[in-house]
Amino acid sequence: MTSASTVRQLLVALDPGLRECGVALFDLDSGELLAAGMPTNAERRTRGLPAWARMADGVSAFVSPFLEPYRTAGEFVAITLASECPQVYTAGKSKGDPNDLIELAGVVGRVAGALKATSERSYLPREWKGTLDADVMIERIKARLAERPHEYLRVQLPRAQDKHHNVWDAIGIGLHVVGRLAPRKAFPR
């Protein structure tokens, strides 16, 4: 085992999907966003083990170029995977096929294995977002990145605007884990 000074602690935050995943890579020590994007699944089938494996390959291919400089420098890279946990809602609030949640869980498992994650965390949407409207949460996420403007340059949004939320959610999960997403309290003077 290498010494503690040569261990790089990284976080891969994941908004899982069957056709694409929002992914954000953070340095756990500094809380800095290193990269964010949305790799896609090249598999024609969208269900089952082959599709899960291809989605995991896509996430791994997205993250690998950012890990290589650390490994080349002889550092051990310890990856924590943080993912939104698929959740079943009551019938009135449910969208889509509940069986898709099993598929999402399979994707998360395959991604953890592909990245050789040393630890895993999962969060229900309410645990990291609270009860905020999705658009309000995205604005909060953007505001946190605005505090470190160079991080914006590391966000690769997909062409399709309706897919941007996948990347913002992955960044939000990561910001939650590193402690940068909590609401700011304003005190009167």
Image: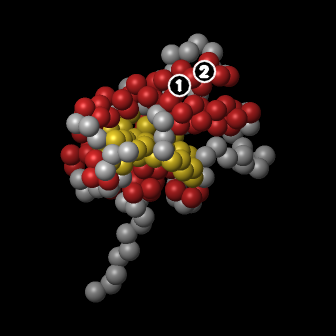
Q: Residue at x 36, y 29 (%)?
A: 64
Which amino acid type is shown beneath numbered disc 1?
Met
Farthest residue to the front: give it: 1
Tell me if label 1 and label 2 are in contact, CB under 8 Å.
Answer: yes
SS for tag 2?
helix
Q: CA distance from mark 1 to mark 2?
A: 6 Å
Closer to the camera in the image, 53 or 168: 53
Q: Residue at x 51, y 16 (%)?
A: 42
Q: Which residue is mark 1?
A: 55
> Relative to 178, does residue 38 appear above or below in the rendering?
above
Closer to the camera in the image, 81 or 47: 81
Image coordinates of residue 133 in percent, x first then y, are 52, 54
Assign the C terminus to one quadrant of the image.
bottom left
> Relative to 73, does residue 145 appear above or below in the rendering?
below
Image coordinates of residue 131 in percent, x first then y, are 56, 60
In the displayed structure, does residue 13 sit left or right of residue 143? right
Q: Which residue is mark 2?
A: 51
Quarter where residue 59 is shown: top left
